[in-house]
Image: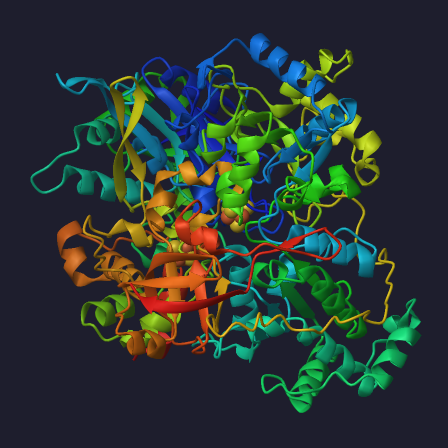
């Protein structure tokens, strides 16, 4: 489909048109400063000027906590679906940032597994309509440009919107995206050559405006080859406060734990909850033995998982999309960009 | 799906968070950027969502009948409580936990006054000693205005601060260090480890000497800050130190080293001193902290002091209760007590003297528990009322910086649960008080008229349609405090302030102090119900110098027996290279036998209780 444009003023009508088939989610401000993906209603303005959301959109597909199923009667193993499992409509996310769309594709690959598929999460991801919003300017923490994950994309979305001032240009790449536009075709017009020029100028400009860089190649080589002395990991890990924030805010992190929790006489809920590889209990075995009891081992493992050739080989790319959330959330200054700089500077 | 801007209930940093709710359940808690633009939470803040459906959750009132707690209607339970309060032989004690909304504290205080009762608060990390010293020396209820002051410091003194205890402070210290700031740690360790700080290794029995050494060094070297010279009592203090040598036999901080330290601090541009829970829960913390604040005043740092973060969470309670607040640990010991109402706490689990407490509870005529979870105290309860967590109620909470912040109700109340203020008003009506505020906002309004420092905070700002969501340091929402408002009063140390507390018993030559693990904080009984936190620290641990373990033939990770006067426990060991050979650091799991090895040393003013150091010895298990 050729690029189309839609006036910003009629964007709510487009989202309303989607609301018949989809649960529409869009970035919204809560409590002043923070932006989240929340259910869109036409009385809440869609925020187009946000840098990024507090938590990545993975929370819509892989919630921080969900009931997988109820065990009604353990003796007879009577199961029923968890309350979040049978989600009503597929999701339509408007305003997904490029890094997050890349992160979502990464999660899809992870949950498609090698021999095991997580049907629930895959169904959510695959049924969703992803409408990304190319970034006009990067945030201070962003480094997607170093990670092949933004600030705009050439694939990995249904529709990519770019803000041209009073209009948005829609770059449509899938049948799902075409169908969505067709459902509200009267709101869209074919992009003019001037629109396309403005679009292309904007994309080129934003690439050059990143202040933050991340030494991805240096990090990958040194981590994969084990070039970082153990003392370095130990020294850096002293600043890790074990909050787990880096894992929770990461669009590609997928660790979870599963617990059974009594929910009445003889009844249990089996729950899945986000977990963090920086937590000491994450790898502790039932015997009490913990292969990664030391913080340094956990930090090292996290970076190996994110950056090494070995994992790139499995997942097809780095496990970092440069969204910068770990920069904002890490209590110890051990985010990907900062630590890769230290690896680059301190471990030749 | 909805997001509710709220505040973490677990410690007195009170980080801004967003509660994610869907279909009436909490799915996640996420950081908010807050006033300082940081979006950080510690492990606890990230994981405060699963407790509302925990199997220990109390959801119905219960009354003891034929020895068993049986479900009752709220009316029956409330009438039973009222009748027991009405027939109490002595003033009932209302023991308040550390994580209650200010409005709930206020409501319970109102009820207590109505029935002629008294109030106490649980003090988990020395808040009461800190508050007393701040008031005594600085004439203010609060120290530093925000955490960023720590991040921007060029010199930080960490006094008895276990960095594991407060991740937010640790994070700001890390930042300050990265930006070139220097860090000096005053603690029981022999070395600071590899983090680049300098260590002043205080013997656990000699904490009280530190402030005196510092004071003397400043006075003798004539380094006192001009404002301190103008403060009331400066002349007395000067005369005292000119007459009184503090010196004596101390290898851990020579006069020259002390002079170098005070010089460095005095001439630093942005110095900050942080007083941690190891300092504030030590025996004699009350007077030691007064003396330390005096030393800091002399150094020109009256407004550069941060006290008691970590597990502490009671700053708003102390504002609301004022001088009425006694430490629970001393209040329940008072003779003649026959009726105890425990609100939002598991006293038995938190008490350093659980054995004495359970004896007391056994003999009380009435024990009422108003709480969110069934804890160890429940087995003594005659009547139980279920209350709510911070995600289930609207209310305010005041952090260590004096910022008053909102809790927002994100999920419905389970079963018959309701906020403590509602229980208080239901009971109060049976005592003839008909007028009780009906909404959280009107409770706040009623409270500000009785708590002077909250009067300037307008309810519409706190509870309006577009209420300001205050994050730490947000202006206008905190009670008046610090800069320019302190009324410094200095006084010469009185009596035997420097006396050490060696407990000269050859059978217990070592000293055990307490450490913390963030996942193990027990604040308000809530966090212990979070599975990920529980998993993080499955057992109590005891750290010792490697040579000590080696001599005993105990490998790190093996268990050893630790003995203290009147008790012993078996505990898993850890080797800690930083420790001197005569010091042990116990990280006890709440309610476990090692937690019972804590000490109970009431401060002389009866305003605080120290729980360490503990004379100890280590044996092979
Ligand atoms: S965000 Fe930083 S401090 Fe927190 S667990 Fe990750 S590395 Fe550690
Ligand atoms: S530091 Fe304190 S307030 Fe902040 S998230 Fe942790 S427990 Fe909550």
On screen, residue B621 above or below B95:
below
User: Which residue is located at x 25 percent, y 34 percent?
Assistant: A173
Q: Residue B93: x and y, percent?
A: 68, 32
User: Which residue is more in the foreground, B314 or B226?
Assistant: B314
Q: Residue at x 71, y 11 (%)?
A: B430
Quadrant of residue A310 within the rendered picture: bottom left
- Residue extending farthest to the left is A115
Q: Quadrant of the C terminus of chain B?
A: bottom left
Ligand 1: quadrant of the figure? bottom left
Q: Is B286 on the left-hand or right-hand side of B297?
A: left
The image position of residue B230, as x and y in percent, is 92, 71
Please identify the quarter of the rendering in which residue B28 is found: top left
Question: Residue at 61% of width from left, 51% of height from top?
Answer: B36
Does B609 sit above or below residue A76? below
* Quarter in which the N terminus of chain B is drawn: top left
Count how many numbered circles sit on residues in the image. Answer: 0
Q: Is residue B5 visible?
A: no
Q: Nearer the viewer, residue B621 or B554?
A: B621
Q: Could you say where residue B591 lies in the image, as x and y percent from the top left? A: 43, 44
Q: Report whether residue B463 is seen.
A: yes
Q: Nearer the viewer, residue A272 or B220?
A: B220
């Amino acid at each position: 489909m050729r690029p189309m444009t839609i006036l910003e003023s009629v964007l709510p009508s487009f989202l309303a048109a989607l609301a018949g088939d989809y649960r529409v989610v869009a970035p919204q401000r809560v409590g002043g400063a923070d932006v989240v993906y929340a259910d869109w209603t036409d009385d809440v303005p869609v925020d187009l000027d946000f840098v990024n959301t507090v938590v990545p959109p993975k929370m819509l597909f892989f919630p921080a906590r969900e009931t997988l199923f109820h065990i009604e009667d353990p003796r007879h193993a009577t199961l029923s679906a968890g309350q979040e499992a049978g989600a009503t409509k597929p999701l339509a996310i408007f305003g997904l940032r490029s890094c997050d769309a890349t992160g979502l594709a990464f999660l899809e690959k992870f949950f498609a597994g090698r021999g095991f598929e997580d049907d629930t999460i895959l169904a959510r991801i695959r049924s969703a309509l992803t409408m990304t919003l190319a970034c006009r300017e990067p945030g201070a923490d962003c480094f997607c440009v170093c990670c092949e994950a933004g600030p705009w994309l050439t694939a990995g979305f249904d529709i990519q919107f770019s803000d041209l001032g009073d209009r948005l240009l829609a770059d449509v790449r899938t049948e799902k995206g075409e169908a969505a536009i067709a459902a509200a075709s009267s709101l869209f017009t074919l992009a003019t050559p001037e629109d396309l020029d403005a679009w292309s100028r904007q994309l080129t400009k934003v690439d050059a405006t990143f202040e933050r860089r991340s030494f991805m190649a240096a990090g990958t080589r040194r981590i994969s080859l084990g070039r970082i002395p153990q003392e370095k990991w130990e020294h850096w890990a002293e600043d890790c406060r074990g909050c787990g924030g880096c894992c929770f805010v990461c669009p590609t992190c997928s660790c979870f734990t599963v617990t059974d929790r009594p929910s009445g006489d003889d009844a249990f809920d089996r729950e899945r909850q986000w977990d963090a590889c920086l937590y000491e209990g994450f790898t502790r075995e039932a015997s009490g033995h913990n292969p990664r009891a030391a913080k340094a081992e956990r930090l090292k493992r996290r970076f190996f998982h994110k950056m090494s050739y070995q994992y790139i080989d499995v997942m097809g790319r780095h496990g970092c999309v440069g969204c910068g959330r770990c920069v904002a959330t890490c209590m110890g200054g051990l985010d990907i960009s900062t630590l890769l700089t230290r690896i680059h500077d301190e471990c030749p | 799906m909805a997001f509710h801007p709220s505040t973490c209930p677990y410690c007195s940093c009170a980080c801004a968070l967003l509660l994610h709710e869907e279909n009436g359940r909490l799915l996640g808690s996420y950081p908010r950027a807050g006033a300082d633009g940081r979006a950080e939470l510690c492990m606890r803040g990230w994981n405060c969502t699963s407790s509302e459906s925990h199997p220990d959750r109390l959801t119905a009132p219960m009354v003891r009948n034929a020895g068993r707690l049986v479900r009752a209607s709220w009316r029956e339970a409330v009438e039973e409580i009222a009748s027991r309060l009405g027939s109490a032989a002595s003033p009932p004690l209302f023991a308040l936990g550390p994580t209650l909304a200010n409005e709930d504290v206020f409501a319970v205080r109102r009820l207590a006054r109505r029935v002629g009762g008294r109030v106490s608060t649980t003090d988990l990390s020395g808040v009461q000693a800190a508050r007393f010293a701040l008031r005594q020396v600085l004439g203010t209820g609060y120290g530093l205005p925000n955490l960023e002051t720590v991040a921007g410091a060029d010199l930080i003194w960490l006094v008895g601060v276990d960095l594991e205890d407060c991740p937010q402070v640790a994070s700001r210290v890390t930042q300050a260090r990265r930006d070139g700031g220097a860090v000096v740690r005053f603690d029981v360790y022999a070395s600071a480890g590899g983090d680049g700080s300098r260590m002043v290794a205080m013997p656990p029995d000699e904490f009280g000497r530190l402030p005196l050494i510092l004071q003397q060094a400043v006075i003798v070297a004539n380094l006192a800050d001009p404002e301190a010279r103008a403060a009331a009592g400066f002349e007395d203090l000067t005369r005292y130190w000119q007459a009184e040598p503090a010196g004596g036999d101390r290898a851990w901080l020579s006069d020259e080293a002390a002079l170098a330290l005070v010089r460095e601090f005095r001439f630093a541009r942005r110095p900050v001193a942080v007083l941690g829970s190891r300092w504030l829960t030590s025996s004699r913390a009350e007077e030691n902290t007064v003396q330390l604040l005096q030393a800091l005043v002399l150094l020109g740092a009256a407004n550069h002091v941060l006290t008691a973060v970590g597990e502490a969470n009671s700053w708003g309670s102390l504002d609301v209760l004022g001088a009425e607040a006694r430490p629970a640990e001393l209040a329940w010991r008072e003779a003649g007590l026959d009726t105890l109402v425990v609100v939002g706490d598991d006293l038995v689990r938190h008490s350093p003297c659980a054995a004495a407490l359970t004896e007391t509870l056994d003999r009380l005529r009435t024990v009422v528990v108003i709480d969110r979870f069934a804890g160890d105290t429940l087995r003594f309860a005659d009547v139980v009322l279920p209350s709510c967590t911070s995600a289930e109620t609207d209310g305010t909470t005041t952090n260590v910086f004096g910022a008053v912040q909102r809790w927002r109700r994100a999920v419905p109340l389970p079963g018959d649960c309701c906020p403590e203020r509602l229980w208080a008003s239901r009971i109060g009506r049976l005592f003839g008080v008909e007028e009780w505020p009906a909404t959280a906002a009107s409770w706040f309004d009623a409270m500000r008229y009785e708590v002077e420092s909250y009067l300037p905070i307008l309810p519409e700002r706190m509870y309006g349609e577009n209420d300001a969501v205050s994050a730490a340091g947000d202006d206008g929402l905190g009670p008046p405090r610090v800069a320019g408002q302190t009324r410094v009063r200095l006084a010469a140390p009185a009596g035997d302030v420097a006396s050490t507390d060696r407990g000269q018993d050859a059978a217990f030559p070592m000293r055990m102090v307490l450490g913390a693990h963030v996942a193990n904080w027990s604040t308000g009984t809530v966090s212990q119900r979070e599975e990920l936190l529980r998993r993080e620290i499955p057992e109590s641990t005891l750290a010792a110098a490697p040579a000590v373990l080696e001599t005993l033939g105990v490998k790190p990770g093996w268990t050893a027996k630790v003995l203290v006067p009147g008790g012993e426990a078996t505990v898993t060991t850890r080797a800690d290279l930083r420790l001197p050979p005569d010091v042990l650091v116990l990280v006890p799991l709440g309610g476990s036998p090692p937690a019972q090895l804590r000490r109970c040393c009431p401060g002389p003013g009866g305003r605080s209780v120290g729980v360490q150091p503990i004379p100890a010895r280590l044996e092979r298990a």
